[in-house]
Image (cartoon, rainbow, N blue to C red):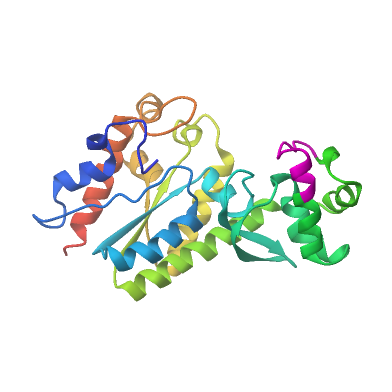
């Protein structure tokens, strides 16, 4: 969403903000958005860039769709830092590489069948035998089938917990780096067009509640559009069909919201 891979560079909301010079004549905007990166990868990037490219204001985009899923669920094809569920809580594992079908059985229930490292080895061996094409739990080794289905888990609960932990870490680092932090809450296309999106609406309510509790500076696109009394037809035009990325008009609307917010930082 932030990288803007489907529009010209000049049409991304980062470029549009820079052209408005919201803070001063020398306002410069660095766009460090990377497609398919989740919040934890963004945190790691912030740790590095807040030193090499210090900023007066840092804007962190939070997408109400797979940004939550990426915090917990493993991606078979990428190494990335993620949270695992362990003994009813979460912990960060750096550079995970595990088949997605084993994600919760390894994290939650490893202790019930022995050493976790042995379970990891079993999972990786199974993945290699199927060339990473495991699609269903019935393809799991018998030992892991049992673990996989032992007990139901409220995964959304842990996604929310992981997001809370991540935003708090962003804020702590921003304070350390002395940069003003803004969280930009980006809706899914279905939520923005009022077609469905109950899950993303609940996620937004959770983040806004956290922002109020922790005194974070949060900007909600859906609230902004509601204040403007935009119709479904208008907000639909802000997203491309299918992938749901911003169109040029979507980037423009985001830029308007952020420019107004940045102007207020001068006061």
Q: Which residues are magenta?
A: 125-136
Q: Residue at x 78, y 64 (%)?
A: 116
Q: Is residue 153 visible?
A: no
Q: Is residue 126 magenta?
A: yes
Q: Is residue 267 magenta?
A: no
Q: Is residue 65 visible?
A: yes
Q: Is residue 166 left or right of residue 147?
A: left
Q: Residue at x 34, y 30 (%)?
A: 247
Point out the image quarter for the N terminus. Answer: top left
Quarter assignment of residue 56: bottom left
Q: Is residue 256 above or below residue 51?
A: above
Quarter assignment of residue 53: bottom left
* Of the pair 80 and 255, the residue shown nearer to us: 80
Q: Residue at x 57, y 40 (%)?
A: 198
Tell me where residue 226 appears, x and y as whole percent: 37, 39
Q: Residue at x 45, y 31 (%)?
A: 244
């Amino acid at each position: 969403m932030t990288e803007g891979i489907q529009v010209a560079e000049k049409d991304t909301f980062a470029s549009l903000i820079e052209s408005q010079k919201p803070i001063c004549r020398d306002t410069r905007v660095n766009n460090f958005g990377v497609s398919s990166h989740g919040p934890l990868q963004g945190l790691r990037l912030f740790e590095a860039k807040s030193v090499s490219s210090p900023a007066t204001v840092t804007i962190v985009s939070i997408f109400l769709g797979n940004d939550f899923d990426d915090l917990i669920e493993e991606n078979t094809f990428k190494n990335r830092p993620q949270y695992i569920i362990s003994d009813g809580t979460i912990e960060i594992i750096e550079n995970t590489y595990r088949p997605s079908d084993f994600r919760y059985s390894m994290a939650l229930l490893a202790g019930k069948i022995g050493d976790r490292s042995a379970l990891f080895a079993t999972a990786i061996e199974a993945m290699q035998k199927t060339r990473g094409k495991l699609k269903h739990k019935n393809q799991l080794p018998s030992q892991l089938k049992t673990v996989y289905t032992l007990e139901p888990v409220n995964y959304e609960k842990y996604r929310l917990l992981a997001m809370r932990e991540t935003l708090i870490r962003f804020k702590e680092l921003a304070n350390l780096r002395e940069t003003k932090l803004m969280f930009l809450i980006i809706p899914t296309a279905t939520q923005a067009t009022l077609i469905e999106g109950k899950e993303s609406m609940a996620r937004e309510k959770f983040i806004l509640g956290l922002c109020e509790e922790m005194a974070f500076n949060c900007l909600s696109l859906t609230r902004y559009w509601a204040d403007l009394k935009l119709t479904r037809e208008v907000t639909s035009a802000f997203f491309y069909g299918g992938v749901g990325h911003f169109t040029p008009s979507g980037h423009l609307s985001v830029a308007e919201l952020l420019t107004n917010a940045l102007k207020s930082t001068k006061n």
